[in-house]
Image (tube, helix red, strand yellow):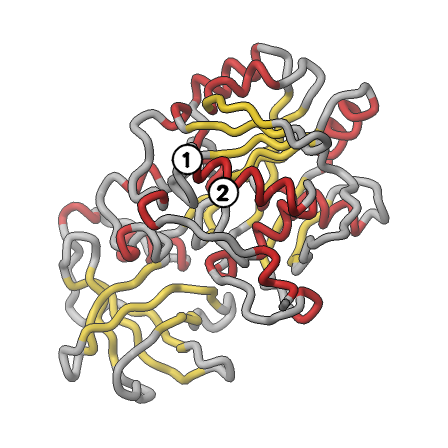
Amino acid sequence: MNEIDRYDYELPRELIAQEPVTSRSDSRLMRMDRKSGKVDHLHVRDIVDLLKPNDVLVLNNTRVLPAKLVGYRKDTGGRWQGLFLQADEETGIWEVLTKTRGKLRAGEILTIKDRHARDGMELVVIARTESGNLLVQPQLPDGYVPHESEGDQTLESPSDWLERYGRIPLPPYIRDGQMVDSDIERYQTVFAKERGSVAAPTAGLHFTETLLHAIRKSGVEIVEVTLHVGIGTFRPIQVSQLDEHQMHHEWGRIDQASVELINSRREEGGRCIAVGTTSVRVLESSATAGQGQLIPWQGMTDLFIKPPYQFQSVDALITNFHLPKSSLLVLVSAFAERELILNAYQKAIDEEYRFFSYGDAMFLA
């Protein structure tokens, strides 16, 4: 058997959540003791009862960019869509992931439509990267007059362009990636601040301001880190052996104040509880850079957490139910035994939990 096949499971399609629950914290929560495998069925709103006053909760405050671009080829009228990946700060040239019928020529213009299907900015094709992604230069068409709803906003950064003309890039398993207006708010956490992700840190989607207030009132400290989630988070592992998998790079940061608070709480017997696998990657990247000690850190990380892995900074984890054969499922299986996780997933299926980005959650402690 290929090693990656050990992280596979059968999921009925009807359990893939297509919409979020009406109230974020009404999502179901499976609590699992990772030593015994004992499982309880609760709701996210019950988290406050699972935390101890000297715990610290770690949230990823990244904000999802409207990175999906939809439009047409100006010369032919053929439909086109792409996903913004990154921009060169010096040249302003964007790298875009795209699949297009026919060959795009250098100098060709792509016209982008906004969420209201109105023609907006243009992308001038520059070249292709070695990996096949498209390099483009954004511009406004000659004589362009902004729609009244756009105001006189200055387009200075890629984020500015995307906020005006882009769309929320839903995963393909949610309505085949087709967003609706409600996704603009619901596919962001209530604490999203730092723009830079192309996917949401989905465990954080369950928290409301009311729940966070109740958690703070109980004595639990809340700190924020940043990890900008990349497109690689959607992709299953394509190789048979985990050691052959090349993890995608993502940019992260944890500051001095957060490090000091987490370290002091843990020294007092409290737990560092990561909300989501993205928070885990920041914390463990920091601890790896500090040779086992949590330190202030920022930079790119390609840390691939797989069994056997000795966690250095995370004591408990709140996370969604992840795709088969994904690096996220492998990470969770490193935090708890693979057999316990797969057994818990089967119980979730039997109990008709909702899976993936808009689905329910687990609390592993």
Q: Position of residue 348 (x, y in %)?
A: 47, 36
- Which amino acid type is shown beneath numbered disc 2? Phe
Picture quadrant of residue 15? top left
Report the quarter where the N terminus lies: bottom right
Q: Position of residue 296 (x, y in %)?
A: 74, 42
Report the quarter where the C terminus lies: top right
**Outermost right residue:** 291
Is residue 253 visible to us here?
Answer: no
Picture quadrant of residue 20? top left
> Decide: marks 1, 2 in contact (CB < 8 A)?
yes
Residue on which disc 1 sits: 353
Q: Nearer the viewer, residue 86 or 353?
A: 353
- Which amino acid type is shown beneath numbered disc 1? Tyr
Q: CA distance from mark 1 to mark 2?
A: 9 Å
Q: Nearer the viewer, residue 127 or 15?
A: 15
Is 238 rendered above or below residue 217? below
- Classify mark 2: helix, strand or loop: loop
Residue 9 is left or right of residue 159, and the answer is right
Badge 1: few (under 14), some or many (20 or more) residues near its Cα, within 10 Å? Answer: many
| Marking on residue 251 | none
Q: Earlier in the sequence, mark 1 or mark 2?
A: 2
Residue on which disc 2 sits: 321
Q: Position of residue 109 (x, y in %)?
A: 25, 79
Q: Position of residue 281 (x, y in %)?
A: 65, 48
